[in-house]
Image: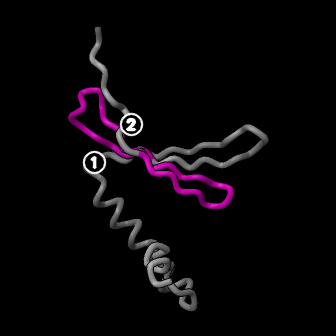
């Protein structure tokens, strides 16, 4: 019998209007390496979805994170200067 391994070990779903994003941490068959898949799912029919997937490998995590942070920061500071940064919903709820 072939040993069982847990391919998907963590998932986070983010609903954003008509789109849903999935951030999944998966292990390789050897269970010694891990990677992230980022999937964008968009409904295009009654029961039909269009999906796009990115595979992000551990050696690229920091570079990807740094580039994403820089791009978001640029948009917030340079392209949307009059719009405040998103608030932390949990922190706002604690204030009430």
Please name whichever residue, 13 or 80, is drawn nearer the observer in this view of the structure: 13
Q: Is the magenta stretch mostly helix, strand or loop?
A: strand
Q: Is 26 above or below relative to 61?
A: above
Q: On the picture, is 52 further left or further right than 94?
A: right
Residue 96 percent coordinates (x, y): 50, 83
Q: Is residue 82 visible?
A: yes
Quadrant housing residue 34: top left
Spatial CA distance of label 2 from label 1 is: 15 Å
Residue 41 percent coordinates (x, y): 60, 47
Check disc 1: other Cα within 10 Å, few if <14, some if 14-19, many if 20+. few
Q: Is 32 above or below relative to 59?
A: above
Name the outermost residue toward the left. 32
Q: Which of the two marks, 2 or 1, is nearer to us in this view?
A: 2
Q: Is mark 2 on a helix, strand or loop?
A: strand
The circle drawn on residue 58 is 1
Span colored in magenta: 11-37
Query: Which residue is under mark 2?
Result: 8
Q: On the picture, is 59 further left or further right than 44?
A: left
The circle drawn on residue 5 is none
Residue at 57%, 91% (x, y): give it.
82
């Amino acid at each position: 019998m072939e040993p069982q391994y847990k391919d998907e070990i963590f998932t986070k779903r983010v609903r954003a209007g008509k789109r849903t994003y999935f951030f999944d941490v998966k292990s390789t068959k050897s269970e010694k390496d891990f990677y992230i898949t980022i999937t964008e799912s968009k409904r295009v029919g009654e029961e039909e979805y269009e999906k796009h997937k990115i595979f992000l490998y551990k050696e690229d995590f920091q570079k990807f994170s740094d580039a994403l942070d820089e791009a978001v920061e640029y948009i917030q500071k340079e392209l949307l200067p009059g719009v405040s940064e998103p608030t932390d919903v949990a922190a706002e709820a604690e204030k009430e």
